Protein backbone atom coordinates (compact mmCIF):
# COMPACT_ATOMS: atom_id res chain seq x y z
CA UNK A 1 0.00 0.00 0.00
CA UNK A 2 3.02 2.27 0.26
CA UNK A 3 3.25 2.31 -3.53
CA UNK A 4 -0.43 3.31 -3.81
CA UNK A 5 0.24 6.19 -1.43
CA UNK A 6 3.31 7.19 -3.45
CA UNK A 7 1.29 7.20 -6.68
CA UNK A 8 -1.30 9.52 -5.10
CA UNK A 9 1.42 11.74 -3.64
CA UNK A 10 3.06 12.10 -7.06
CA UNK A 11 -0.27 13.06 -8.59
CA UNK A 12 -0.89 15.62 -5.86
CA UNK A 13 2.53 17.22 -6.27
CA UNK A 14 2.44 17.30 -10.08
CA UNK A 15 -1.17 18.46 -10.37
CA UNK A 16 -3.94 15.94 -9.91
CA UNK A 17 -6.35 15.25 -12.79
CA UNK A 18 -9.80 15.62 -11.26
CA UNK A 19 -12.23 15.14 -14.14
CA UNK A 20 -13.35 11.63 -13.14
CA UNK A 21 -13.06 12.21 -9.40
CA UNK A 22 -15.16 15.35 -9.67
CA UNK A 23 -17.77 13.55 -11.76
CA UNK A 24 -18.16 10.95 -9.03
CA UNK A 25 -18.15 13.38 -6.11
CA UNK A 26 -20.72 15.64 -7.78
CA UNK A 27 -22.94 12.61 -8.34
CA UNK A 28 -22.76 11.75 -4.63
CA UNK A 29 -23.70 15.31 -3.69
CA UNK A 30 -26.63 15.19 -6.11
CA UNK A 31 -27.86 11.99 -4.49
CA UNK A 32 -27.57 13.54 -1.04
CA UNK A 33 -29.71 16.51 -2.06
CA UNK A 34 -32.57 14.05 -2.63
CA UNK A 35 -32.39 12.88 1.00
CA UNK A 36 -34.31 15.18 3.40
CA UNK A 37 -31.86 14.61 6.21
CA UNK A 38 -28.89 16.37 7.71
CA UNK A 39 -26.10 14.08 8.84
CA UNK A 40 -24.35 14.42 12.16
CA UNK A 41 -20.89 13.10 11.29
CA UNK A 42 -19.59 12.13 7.86
CA UNK A 43 -16.48 10.23 6.80
CA UNK A 44 -14.95 11.02 3.40
CA UNK A 45 -12.61 8.26 2.19
CA UNK A 46 -10.60 9.49 -0.79
CA UNK A 47 -10.09 13.24 -1.05
CA UNK A 48 -8.00 14.44 -4.01
CA UNK A 49 -9.52 17.95 -3.72
CA UNK A 50 -9.16 19.84 -0.44
CA UNK A 51 -12.40 21.71 -1.19
CA UNK A 52 -14.51 18.56 -0.98
CA UNK A 53 -14.96 18.51 2.82
CA UNK A 54 -16.38 22.02 2.77
CA UNK A 55 -18.81 21.07 -0.01
CA UNK A 56 -19.89 17.94 1.84
CA UNK A 57 -20.38 20.11 4.90
CA UNK A 58 -23.58 21.42 3.33
CA UNK A 59 -25.11 18.06 4.32
CA UNK A 60 -23.16 17.14 7.47
CA UNK A 61 -22.32 18.88 10.73
CA UNK A 62 -18.83 17.38 10.80
CA UNK A 63 -16.70 15.85 8.06
CA UNK A 64 -13.69 13.64 8.81
CA UNK A 65 -11.27 12.97 5.95
CA UNK A 66 -9.13 9.92 5.27
CA UNK A 67 -7.03 9.21 2.19
CA UNK A 68 -4.29 6.74 1.27
CA UNK A 69 -2.07 9.63 0.11
CA UNK A 70 -0.11 11.76 2.56
CA UNK A 71 -0.18 14.92 0.45
CA UNK A 72 -3.94 14.75 -0.04
CA UNK A 73 -4.38 14.17 3.70
CA UNK A 74 -2.22 17.15 4.60
CA UNK A 75 -4.13 19.44 2.25
CA UNK A 76 -7.50 18.34 3.65
CA UNK A 77 -6.32 18.12 7.28
CA UNK A 78 -7.25 14.47 7.50
CA UNK A 79 -5.67 11.13 8.34
CA UNK A 80 -4.03 8.31 6.40
CA UNK A 81 -6.10 5.19 5.73
CA UNK A 82 -5.49 1.71 4.39
CA UNK A 83 -9.08 0.64 4.03
CA UNK A 84 -8.55 -3.05 4.72
CA UNK A 85 -6.10 -2.41 7.57
CA UNK A 86 -7.36 0.27 9.98
CA UNK A 87 -9.14 0.44 13.32
CA UNK A 88 -12.52 2.06 12.63
CA UNK A 89 -14.33 3.88 15.41
CA UNK A 90 -17.40 1.79 16.21
CA UNK A 91 -20.73 3.28 15.10
CA UNK A 92 -19.28 6.77 14.62
CA UNK A 93 -20.54 7.86 11.19
CA UNK A 94 -24.07 8.23 9.90
CA UNK A 95 -22.67 9.04 6.43
CA UNK A 96 -19.67 7.56 4.62
CA UNK A 97 -18.51 8.57 1.14
CA UNK A 98 -15.88 6.34 -0.47
CA UNK A 99 -14.50 7.89 -3.65
CA UNK A 100 -12.20 5.99 -5.99
CA UNK A 101 -9.88 4.10 -3.64
CA UNK A 102 -11.57 0.81 -2.75
CA UNK A 103 -10.79 -0.75 -6.14
CA UNK A 104 -7.08 -0.86 -5.26
CA UNK A 105 -7.21 -2.46 -1.80
CA UNK A 106 -5.90 -5.99 -1.25
CA UNK A 107 -9.03 -7.24 0.52
CA UNK A 108 -12.22 -5.47 -0.62
CA UNK A 109 -14.63 -7.60 1.47
CA UNK A 110 -12.66 -6.79 4.61
CA UNK A 111 -12.50 -3.09 3.70
CA UNK A 112 -16.29 -3.00 3.33
CA UNK A 113 -16.78 -4.79 6.65
CA UNK A 114 -14.57 -2.27 8.43
CA UNK A 115 -16.50 0.62 6.88
CA UNK A 116 -19.75 -0.99 8.01
CA UNK A 117 -18.34 -1.28 11.52
CA UNK A 118 -17.69 2.48 11.52
CA UNK A 119 -21.30 3.29 10.57
CA UNK A 120 -24.20 4.02 12.87
CA UNK A 121 -27.26 1.77 12.76
CA UNK A 122 -29.04 4.28 10.50
CA UNK A 123 -25.93 5.12 8.49
CA UNK A 124 -25.67 5.61 4.72
CA UNK A 125 -22.77 4.61 2.48
CA UNK A 126 -22.29 6.23 -0.93
CA UNK A 127 -19.35 5.85 -3.24
CA UNK A 128 -17.81 4.78 -6.51
CA UNK A 129 -15.04 2.54 -7.78
CA UNK A 130 -13.72 1.45 -11.15
CA UNK A 131 -15.48 -1.55 -12.63
CA UNK A 132 -14.15 -4.57 -14.48
CA UNK A 133 -14.69 -3.09 -17.96
CA UNK A 134 -12.42 -0.12 -17.29
CA UNK A 135 -9.53 0.63 -19.71
CA UNK A 136 -10.14 -1.90 -22.51
CA UNK A 137 -8.00 0.04 -24.99
CA UNK A 138 -5.08 0.21 -22.55
CA UNK A 139 -5.32 -3.50 -21.84
CA UNK A 140 -5.34 -4.30 -25.55
CA UNK A 141 -2.31 -2.07 -26.14
CA UNK A 142 -0.39 -3.77 -23.34
CA UNK A 143 -1.22 -7.19 -24.78
CA UNK A 144 0.38 -6.03 -28.02
CA UNK A 145 3.49 -5.01 -26.10
CA UNK A 146 3.59 -8.35 -24.28
CA UNK A 147 3.21 -10.23 -27.56
CA UNK A 148 6.33 -8.53 -28.84
CA UNK A 149 8.42 -9.31 -25.75
CA UNK A 150 6.98 -12.80 -25.35
CA UNK A 151 6.37 -12.22 -21.64
CA UNK A 152 2.87 -11.67 -20.28
CA UNK A 153 2.72 -9.42 -17.25
CA UNK A 154 -0.09 -7.82 -15.20
CA UNK A 155 -0.31 -4.16 -16.21
CA UNK A 156 -3.77 -3.22 -14.88
CA UNK A 157 -5.16 -3.78 -11.40
CA UNK A 158 -8.02 -6.34 -11.37
CA UNK A 159 -11.37 -4.70 -10.70
CA UNK A 160 -14.67 -5.91 -9.32
CA UNK A 161 -17.50 -6.69 -11.72
CA UNK A 162 -20.72 -4.72 -11.39
CA UNK A 163 -22.69 -7.91 -10.69
CA UNK A 164 -20.40 -8.77 -7.75
CA UNK A 165 -20.46 -5.47 -5.90
CA UNK A 166 -23.98 -5.58 -4.41
CA UNK A 167 -23.41 -9.08 -2.94
CA UNK A 168 -20.12 -7.85 -1.45
CA UNK A 169 -21.91 -4.94 0.21
CA UNK A 170 -24.56 -7.28 1.58
CA UNK A 171 -21.92 -9.70 2.88
CA UNK A 172 -20.32 -6.81 4.75
CA UNK A 173 -23.52 -6.42 6.79
CA UNK A 174 -25.04 -3.60 4.75
CA UNK A 175 -28.60 -3.51 3.44
CA UNK A 176 -30.47 -2.06 0.47
CA UNK A 177 -27.37 -2.26 -1.72
CA UNK A 178 -27.75 -0.58 -5.12
CA UNK A 179 -25.14 -0.41 -7.89
CA UNK A 180 -25.36 1.81 -10.98
CA UNK A 181 -22.93 1.72 -13.90
CA UNK A 182 -21.61 4.88 -15.56
CA UNK A 183 -19.49 4.25 -18.66
CA UNK A 184 -17.41 7.32 -19.41
CA UNK A 185 -15.76 7.48 -22.83
CA UNK A 186 -12.70 9.69 -23.31
CA UNK A 187 -11.02 10.05 -26.70
CA UNK A 188 -7.24 10.36 -26.79
CA UNK A 189 -4.94 11.43 -29.59
CA UNK A 190 -2.08 9.25 -28.34
CA UNK A 191 -1.31 6.43 -25.93
CA UNK A 192 0.97 8.70 -23.90
CA UNK A 193 -1.90 11.10 -23.21
CA UNK A 194 -3.93 8.30 -21.62
CA UNK A 195 -0.95 7.21 -19.53
CA UNK A 196 -0.42 10.83 -18.50
CA UNK A 197 -4.00 11.09 -17.28
CA UNK A 198 -3.69 7.85 -15.29
CA UNK A 199 -0.52 9.12 -13.63
CA UNK A 200 -2.20 12.43 -12.84
CA UNK A 201 -5.05 10.51 -11.19
CA UNK A 202 -2.59 8.39 -9.18
CA UNK A 203 -3.96 5.12 -10.55
CA UNK A 204 -1.08 3.52 -12.44
CA UNK A 205 0.02 -0.06 -11.74
CA UNK A 206 0.68 -0.97 -8.08
CA UNK A 207 0.50 -4.76 -8.39
CA UNK A 208 3.23 -6.73 -6.63
CA UNK A 209 3.73 -8.77 -9.84
CA UNK A 210 3.98 -5.67 -12.03
CA UNK A 211 6.98 -5.31 -14.36
CA UNK A 212 9.78 -3.51 -12.56
CA UNK A 213 11.25 -2.05 -15.76
CA UNK A 214 9.47 0.28 -18.19
CA UNK A 215 8.61 -1.00 -21.63
CA UNK A 216 11.56 -1.05 -23.98
CA UNK A 217 11.42 1.08 -27.10
CA UNK A 218 10.05 -1.65 -29.38
CA UNK A 219 7.39 -2.80 -26.89
CA UNK A 220 6.29 0.77 -26.28
CA UNK A 221 6.05 1.37 -30.02
CA UNK A 222 3.88 -1.75 -30.32
CA UNK A 223 1.56 -0.51 -27.58
CA UNK A 224 1.33 2.93 -29.16
CA UNK A 225 0.58 1.47 -32.59
CA UNK A 226 -2.11 -0.87 -31.25
CA UNK A 227 -3.72 2.01 -29.40
CA UNK A 228 -3.63 4.20 -32.51
CA UNK A 229 -5.02 1.43 -34.75
CA UNK A 230 -8.01 1.02 -32.43
CA UNK A 231 -9.09 4.60 -33.06
CA UNK A 232 -10.85 6.59 -35.73
CA UNK A 233 -10.21 10.12 -37.01
CA UNK A 234 -6.93 10.32 -35.13
CA UNK A 235 -8.40 9.56 -31.70
CA UNK A 236 -8.89 6.37 -29.72
CA UNK A 237 -11.80 5.94 -27.34
CA UNK A 238 -10.97 4.70 -23.86
CA UNK A 239 -13.69 3.66 -21.42
CA UNK A 240 -13.76 4.25 -17.70
CA UNK A 241 -16.47 2.11 -16.11
CA UNK A 242 -17.57 3.70 -12.84
CA UNK A 243 -19.62 1.67 -10.37
CA UNK A 244 -21.71 4.00 -8.22
CA UNK A 245 -22.99 2.25 -5.12
CA UNK A 246 -25.14 2.95 -2.10
CA UNK A 247 -26.03 0.86 0.94
CA UNK A 248 -27.38 1.29 4.44
CA UNK A 249 -26.51 0.01 7.86
CA UNK A 250 -29.74 -1.28 9.31
CA UNK A 251 -32.84 0.79 8.62
CA UNK A 252 -32.09 4.16 7.02
CA UNK A 253 -33.49 7.35 8.47
CA UNK A 254 -34.69 9.51 5.61
CA UNK A 255 -35.77 12.58 7.50
Image (cartoon, rainbow, N blue to C red):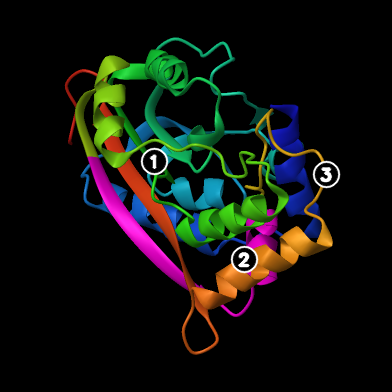
Is residue 192 within the magenta segment? yes
Residue 121 screen position, x and y as percent: 27, 16
Q: Give the residue number, with chain letter if any, for mark 3.
A: 213
Q: Point out the residue furthest to the bottom here.
A: 233
Question: In whole angstroms, how far apart are the C-alphas of marks 3 and 2?
Answer: 19 Å
Question: In whole angstroms, how far apart are the C-alphas of marks 3 and 1?
Answer: 34 Å
Q: In terms of sequence position, does the residue under pointer 3 or pointer 1 come before the other?
A: 1
The foreground one among 211 and 99 is 211
Give the quarter of the figure containing the N terminus: top right
The crowding category of the residue bearing disc 3, from other C-alpha atoms within 10 Å (few below 14, some 14 to 19, many at least 20), is few
Q: Give the residue number, with chain letter if any, for mark 1.
A: 127
In the rendered image, the vertical position of residue 81 relative to residue 121, given as above or below = below
**Which mark lies nearer to you, 1 or 2?**
2
Q: Give the residue number, with chain letter if any, for mark 2.
A: 194
Q: Which residues are magenta?
A: 179-201
Q: Are marks 3 and 1 in contact (CB under 8 Å)?
A: no
In the rendered image, the vertical position of residue 130 relative to residue 17, given as above or below = above
Q: In terms of sequence position, does the residue under pointer 3 or pointer 2 come before the other?
A: 2
Residue 73 screen position, x and y as percent: 69, 38
The crowding category of the residue bearing disc 1, from other C-alpha atoms within 10 Å (few below 14, some 14 to 19, many at least 20), is many
Mark 2 falls on what kind of element?
helix
The crowding category of the residue bearing disc 2, from other C-alpha atoms within 10 Å (few below 14, some 14 to 19, many at least 20), is some
Amino acid sequence: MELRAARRDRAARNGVELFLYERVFADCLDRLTLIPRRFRRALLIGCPDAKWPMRLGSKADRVDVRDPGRVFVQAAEGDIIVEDHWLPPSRAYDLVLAIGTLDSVNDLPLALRLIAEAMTEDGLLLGAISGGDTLPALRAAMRAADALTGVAAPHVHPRVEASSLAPLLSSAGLTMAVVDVDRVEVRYRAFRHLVGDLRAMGVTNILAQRPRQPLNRRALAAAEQAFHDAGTDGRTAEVFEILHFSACKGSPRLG
